[in-house]
Image: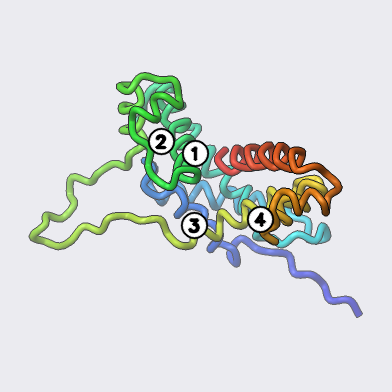
Amino acid sequence: METETKKPTAEENLGLVHLCANKFRNRGIEYDDLYSAGCVGLLKAVRAFDETRGVRFSTYAVPVILGEIKRLFRDGGTIRVSRGLKELSLRLQRICESFRREQFREPTVSELAEISGESESDVSEALCVSQPVVSLTAPDEEEGQIDIPVDAPDELIVDLLALRQIMRSLEPADRTLLELRYFRNMTQSAAAKVLGMTQVQVSRREKKLLTQMRRELLE
């Protein structure tokens, strides 16, 4: 006798919304607004999820939840600014994230200006737009310590789920190439022998795939 598969519910998966919302803390939009947008994404995921496709609900739901939260940033934040400045701010955030992954440090204003092709004054103004609003009622030093926000360790879980979703969407040969290089730690030459390719072909394909995946993760 077959056991009926239990359909996921929104109530059981609210933790996914918290994980996704935490990824966007301190970027100029209140956490409650981030959480509300994430809940909309969760409800959409619950309604559209098909358990017969063999994909875990969390793997399917996280990109949907992240999409709704990112829509919140595209549609507007807590402070009204010009559309151009808002778009530049979001573009600089993506550049910063990419720069940190590649250089393992924060970019300077001049480096951001060079990469983006914008003036340093425009970059500085756009960076101010992306900063969180500081409360005028924050406690004084005498009343207690103000904690400096740091990235939550749960953010790694969200990134891994998003990466897994992207890996699933790749062609089998491309997925195998990345698995050989980054999960089995093979050199490009060793991976080329397994795949029946040259080392140059592996290098070019790998670079193209990594660029594509970075773009999808940052969108």
Q: Amino acid at mark 4?
A: Tyr
Cα separation, mark 4 vs mark 3, equals 21 Å
Q: Which residue carries the number 2 mark?
A: 77
Q: Can the viewer see residue 28?
A: yes
Q: Are marks 1 and 2 in contact (CB under 8 Å)?
A: yes
Q: Nearer the viewer, mark 3 or mark 2?
A: 3
For label 4, the SS is helix
Q: Amino acid at mark 2?
A: Gly
Looking at the image, tell me whether mark 4 or mark 3 is earlier in sequence order: 3
Q: Are marks 4 and 3 in contact (CB under 8 Å)?
A: no
Residue 133: horizontal and vertical position, in percent?
Answer: 29, 41
Looking at the image, tell me whether mark 3 or mark 2 is earlier in sequence order: 2
Q: Are marks 3 and 2 in contact (CB under 8 Å)?
A: no
Q: Are marks 3 and 1 in contact (CB under 8 Å)?
A: no
Disc ID at residue 155: 3
Q: Nearer the viewer, mark 3 or mark 1?
A: 3
Residue 192: horizontal and vertical position, in percent?
Answer: 79, 48
- Say few, some or many: other residues with alpha carbon within 10 Å of mark 1 (under 14 / 14 to 19 / 20 or more): some
Q: Is residue 71 left or right of residue 212?
A: left
